[in-house]
Image (cartoon, grey):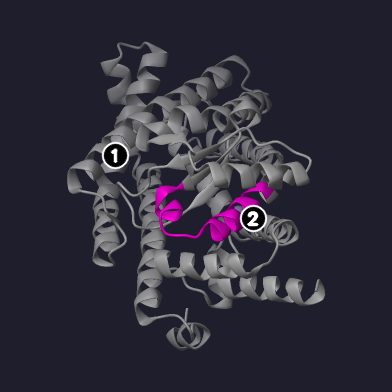
Amino acid sequence: MTATKESTASVGDSIESRRYNRIKRRLGLADFVVGFGLLVVLLATGWTGTLRDFAERGASQNYPFAVFLYVLMLMLISKAVGTPLEYYEFRIEHRYNLSNQKFRSWLWDQCKGFLLGLIMGTIVVEVLYALMRQTPQHWWIAAWLVFLGLMILLAQVAPVVLFPIFYKFEPLENEELKRRLIVLSERAGTRVRGVYKWHLSEKSKKANAALTGLGPTRRIILADTLLDHYSDDEIEAVLAHELGHHVHRHILKSIFVQAGITLFGFWLADQVLRFAVERRNMFETMSDFANLPLLILVSTVLSFLLMPALNAYSRFNERQADRYCFQSVATVQPFISSMNKLAEQNLSEKTPSRWVEWLLHSHPAITKRVSAAETWARSHT
Ligand SMILES: [Zn+2]
């Protein structure tokens, strides 16, 4: 990264926004380095073996319970190492006046997040190692099938089970907006199951909207921070964009993409584990759960390498949803003003440098989205 390149590319963004986004990027990088470093240290020093011995002794040789104890210890260590960075991020959000969250609420969220991670992590790891014990040759295919099932289940239950752990939701009560949504979705020949007000303002000053869920739980969620400060026309534009995701079945398509990547990931993990067990004698068997950091390392590196491609795919979807919005609303002006408002409210960079956008952004730069809207309007008048 060169500072000059970044500053010339970010003309039009405030110094504050540039600083904030630079800090956030560095935090993301630090988080990655710390996580990666922890895994490497555990493997290189053999401490993962010490942890496994602890777990086995604590569980008096009961394998599933030992797996749980190992996961618990690993998660506690990683939480201890990662919390300073998370606390720093909490402070940064306040320093830039983007957060409404009190320290106690943040702490409570951390506890809930840890418990949730522990429950989900335990389920996944128990299943993985049970499969490795039963079918050491084909565990990765079986694991992929189980994972696929879990992914679809999670997409379904997330809006009704997971999100409410952290935020309150209630059906949108604005009749005028609801009427507009019905008109929009009828024009699309589709039906979205619900629009919900997302009580984000208890924690953040930022605004957001999303399409979430799968099948019966599919719904559009609109942050109260958006509902309170945007005109009905602007909210309609945001709704139309989210409806675009719905019409183009982006959630289902993303699950397919993830499924392909996960299949490759499990195959790769199997190859790496086999190499570590058979060639390097790092572990006695495949089902020695001290190799868990190696499994996580494979998935961390794979996600890191695929990040630009996945972000490019996401930006493609966002452009598609934007185009859907342009077609469905009377004029693109509210879309443009909502984009500019969002950028200001969330302190996002309207013109990130090209490499930042390419590598890290799941959405196209605001200036590009705005100019796409203007181009569309020019060619359709
Ligand atoms: Zn979108």
Q: Residue at x 58, y 50 (%)?
A: 302
Label 2 – label 1 distance at C-alpha? 28 Å
Q: Which mark is residue 109?
A: 1
Residue 44: percent from the left, percent from the top?
A: 38, 46
| Magenta region includes residue 224 | yes
Residue 261: percent from the left, percent from the top?
A: 67, 43
Kindly identify the amino acid type of the residue bearing the numbered disc 1: Asp
Residue 144: percent from the left, percent from the top?
A: 65, 29
User: Along the horizontal axis of the image, is 378 left or right of 227?
Assistant: right
Asked whether 105 or 354 is in front, the reply is 105
Residue 271 showing in the rendered view: yes
Kindly identify the amino acid type of the residue bearing the numbered disc 2: Ser
Magenta segment? 223-243
- Mark 2 or mark 1, earlier in chain: 1
Mark 2 element type:
helix
Q: Quadrant of the C terminus?
A: bottom right
Asked whether 132 or 124 is in front, the reply is 124
The residue carrying mark 2 is: 314
Q: Is residue 142 above or below residue 74?
A: above
Point out the quarter of the image occupied by ligand 1. bottom right
Residue 257 showing in the rendered view: no
Asked whether 233 or 121 is in front, the reply is 233
Residue 106: percent from the left, percent from the top?
A: 25, 45
